[in-house]
């Protein structure tokens, strides 16, 4: 039996939270070295890449309830990924990309990077390129520092700009409640505010937290909750003071730990189990200080083909 070539591939890709995000001093090129521990969690975008009639060119479509600010043109990170890989492997540009967004936009959960990772995986499958994980990660790191992690998912330590990823051992499942804001925060402006708040301070080279890695190894959610750390949190709270109120509500309702995810404004609360998650979700919703509340768990796998047509 001959196998028909695929005409369309759907890839599901998760969002991430940073369990640790330690930011080093600003470097000469304006960027910061970071040490981060990522966890991929169960909030997903679905990216469909479809072959189009020759000569019809490139088409991008964004679907979902909260897609404000997501560009439906060549500046979309998924489109940039497609252009890059199609050029590199001479695949032409007659492609459709449809992104069904659930990952909060500009929420510190790497939604754009996730869509880029999904596009790389989809094109690899669509054209049977047979790329290795390393080859995909190399292409991904040209697009954004979070893309390599979104390809692998799970739990990982990121160094450099966050793009030098090594898998971390993690046992058990962790339950999260996320407070999602309807208006995002721009990552460059959060780093800018971080620099402003740190002006004149000596900033040490960051290291991964042993306590955090040990807690993941031991499936110890209580210690993990105490180990969560994000150097961008003061900057995100300075730009968006309401985040402090949200963090306080979580604390009050017994979250094991609370943290602004990445550059924010999503706030992630670690809870002991699903029931605790439900209680906290109700408390956050009725507090009136939160846009919307989503429950998720992690770690989950990275970008993965879920349908081939
Ligand atoms: P970062 O990865 O920089 O921390 P983030 O996770 O906070 O960003 P994203 O959802 O990736 O936020 O969006 C950041 C910006 O990237 C958006 O405001 C939008 O202008 C642009 N963007 C480009 N492509 C995408 C995409 N596929 N999905 C969402 N945003 C995108």
Image (spheres, rainbow, N blue to C red):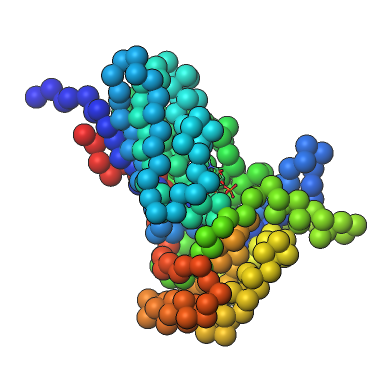
Looking at the image, residue 16 sits to the left or right of residue 200; the answer is left
Looking at the image, residue 49 sits to the left or right of residue 210; the answer is left
What is the residue that sits farthest to the left in this orientation? 1
| Foreground of the two, 31 or 73 | 73
| Foreground of the two, 35 or 194 | 194
| Foreground of the two, 14 or 49 | 49
Looking at the image, residue 75 sits to the left or right of residue 95; the answer is right
Which residue is pictured at 47% across the width and 25% down the height?
Answer: 83
Residue 4 lies, with reference to residue 18, above or below; the image says: above
Q: At which x and y percent is residue 196? A: 82, 56
| Foreground of the two, 43 or 34 | 43
Which residue is pictured at 78% across the width and 37% down the height?
Answer: 29
Residue 2 lies, with reference to residue 64, above or below; the image says: above
Which residue is pictured at 59% across the width and 42% down the height?
Answer: 145
Residue 277 lies, with reference to residue 21, above or below; the image says: below
Q: Is residue 46 visible?
A: yes
Residue 66 lies, with reference to residue 57, above or below; the image says: below
Quarter of the picture holding the C terminus:
top left
Q: Is residue 133 visible?
A: no
């Amino acid at each position: 039996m001959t196998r028909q070539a695929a005409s369309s591939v759907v890839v599901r890709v998760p969002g991430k939270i940073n369990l640790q995000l330690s930011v080093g001093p600003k470097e000469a090129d304006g960027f910061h070295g970071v040490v981060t521990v990522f966890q991929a969690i169960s909030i997903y975008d679905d990216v469909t890449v479809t072959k189009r009639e020759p000569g019809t060119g490139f088409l991008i479509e964004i679907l979902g309830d909260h897609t404000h600010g997501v560009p439906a043109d060549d500046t979309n990170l998924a489109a940039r990924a497609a252009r890059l890989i199609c050029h590199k492997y001479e695949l032409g540009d007659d492609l459709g990309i449809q992104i069904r967004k659930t990952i909060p936009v500009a929420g510190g959960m790497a939604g754009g990077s996730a869509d880029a990772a999904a596009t790389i995986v989809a094109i690899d499958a669509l054209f049977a390129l047979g790329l290795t994980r390393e080859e995909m990660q190399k292409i991904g790191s040209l697009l954004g520092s979070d893309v390599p992690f979104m390809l692998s998912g799970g739990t990982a330590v990121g160094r450099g700009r966050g793009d030098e990823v090594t898998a971390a051992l993690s046992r058990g499942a962790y339950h999260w409640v996320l407070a999602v804001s309807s208006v995002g925060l721009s990552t460059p402006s959060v780093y800018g505010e971080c620099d402003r708040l740190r002006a004149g301070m000596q900033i040490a080279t960051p290291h991964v937290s042993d306590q955090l890695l040990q807690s993941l190894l031991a499936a110890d959610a209580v210690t993990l909750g105490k180990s969560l750390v994000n150097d961008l949190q003061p900057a995100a709270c300075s730009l968006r003071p309401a985040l402090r109120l949200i963090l306080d509500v979580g604390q009050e309702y017994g979250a094991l730990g609370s943290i602004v995810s990445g550059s924010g404004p999503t706030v992630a609360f670690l809870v002991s189990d699903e029931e605790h998650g439900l209680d906290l979700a109700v408390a956050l919703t009725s507090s009136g200080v939160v846009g919307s509340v989503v429950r998720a768990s992690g770690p989950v796998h990275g970008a993965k083909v879920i349908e081939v047509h």
